[in-house]
Image (cartoon, helix red, strand yellow):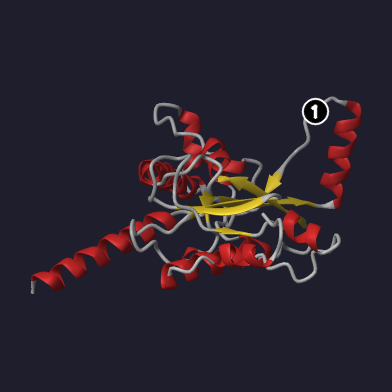
């Protein structure tokens, strides 16, 4: 009975870690609206330098010039699928989570001007902002479990990555032209830690005469999951087959 309880407790801890890892999306999207008249007037204002251009944004309650009243999506595909009314053209705008937080002001209940927030989309965005701030604090604390420098970031599809057998963490990854590697909670510190690697894009191109054809962008995930399931390091095996890859 005790063994079952311990196993269930471990399972709950892993699920909690996965939920914190997945957390909030890292991007927010809104839609800027414009018609021919607005585009022309903004162009004239830009040429004459007399007034700043007018920005118009989509809100479920109607177009608004206040970006903190606009509708924000957390999913890019959903934002792209929205279509404006016939008189408007649209432009998708992307913000990081930190930029989104800065866009949404904190309400001042003592100021009469904030009566405009009643029946607006501002309250929804304010809730998004507060949730994001709360999550950022939670993730900042959870991030301390990892032995990794700041260059390591979350994977885009955590459900496809297995947690480490030893520390129970889904890895962070660092992918750049000359390297692809993972980091979890195993190791001495952020510079000396357990890491699974995959061949970099520059290594692949170099040994294939400048071609990136058939380059496997998913190789790091495959290598990591293979290590978790079988304790086999595929990159080390690959290095034994090819000279000077990295």
Residue beneath disc 1: 51
Q: Which quadrant is home to the C terminus?
A: bottom right
Q: Is residue 201 left or right of residue 60?
A: right
- Label 1, secondary structure: give it: loop
Q: Position of residue 171 (x, y in %)?
A: 46, 56
Q: Position of residue 159 (x, y in %)?
A: 46, 68
Residue visible at 45% across and 40% down? 190
Q: Which quadrant is home to the N terminus?
A: bottom left
Q: Nearer the viewer, residue 193 or 142?
A: 193
Residue positioned most to the left: 1
Badge 1 crowding class, 10 Å Cα cut-off, few under 14, some 14 to 19, many 20 or more, is few
Whether residue 71 appears in this view of the structure is no
Q: Is residue 240 left or right of residue 8?
A: right
Q: Position of residue 47 (x, y in %)?
A: 91, 31
Q: Position of residue 40 (x, y in %)?
A: 89, 43
Q: Quadrant of residue 228?
A: bottom left
Q: Quadrant of residue 203?
A: bottom right
Residue visible at 78% across and 35% down? 53
Above or below residue 34? Residue 117 is above
Residue visible at 51% across and 65% down? 233
Above or below residue 81? Residue 144 is above
Whether residue 227 appears in this view of the structure is yes
Q: How many marks are shown on the rendered structure?
A: 1
Above or below residue 82? Residue 125 is above
Q: Nearer the viewer, residue 127 or 156?
A: 156
């Amino acid at each position: 009975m005790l063994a079952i309880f311990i196993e269930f407790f471990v399972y709950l801890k892993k699920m909690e870690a996965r939920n914190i890892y997945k957390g909030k999306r890292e991007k927010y999207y809104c839609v800027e609206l414009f018609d021919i008249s607005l585009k022309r007037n903004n162009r004239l204002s830009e040429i004459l330098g007399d007034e700043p251009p007018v920005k118009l944004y989509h809100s479920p309650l109607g177009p608004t010039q206040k970006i903190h009243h606009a509708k924000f999506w957390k999913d890019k595909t959903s934002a792209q699928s929205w279509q404006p009314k016939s008189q408007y053209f649209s432009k998708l705008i992307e913000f990081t989570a930190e930029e989104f937080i800065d866009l949404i002001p904190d309400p001042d209940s003592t100021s009469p001007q904030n009566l405009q927030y009643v029946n607006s989309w501002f309250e929804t965005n304010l809730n998004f902002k507060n949730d994001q701030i709360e999550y950022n604090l939670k993730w900042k604390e959870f991030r301390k479990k990892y032995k990794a420098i700041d260059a390591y970031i979350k994977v885009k599809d955590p459900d496809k990555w297995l947690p480490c057998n030893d520390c129970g963490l889904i890895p962070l990854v660092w992918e750049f032209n000359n390297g692809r590697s993972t980091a979890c909670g195993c190791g001495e510190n952020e510079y000396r830690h357990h890491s699974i690697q995959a061949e970099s894009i520059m290594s692949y191109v170099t040994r294939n005469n400048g071609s990136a054809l058939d380059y496997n962008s998913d190789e790091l995930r495959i290598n990591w999951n293979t290590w978790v399931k079988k304790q086999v390091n595929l990159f080390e095996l690959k290095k034994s087959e090819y000279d000077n890859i990295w």
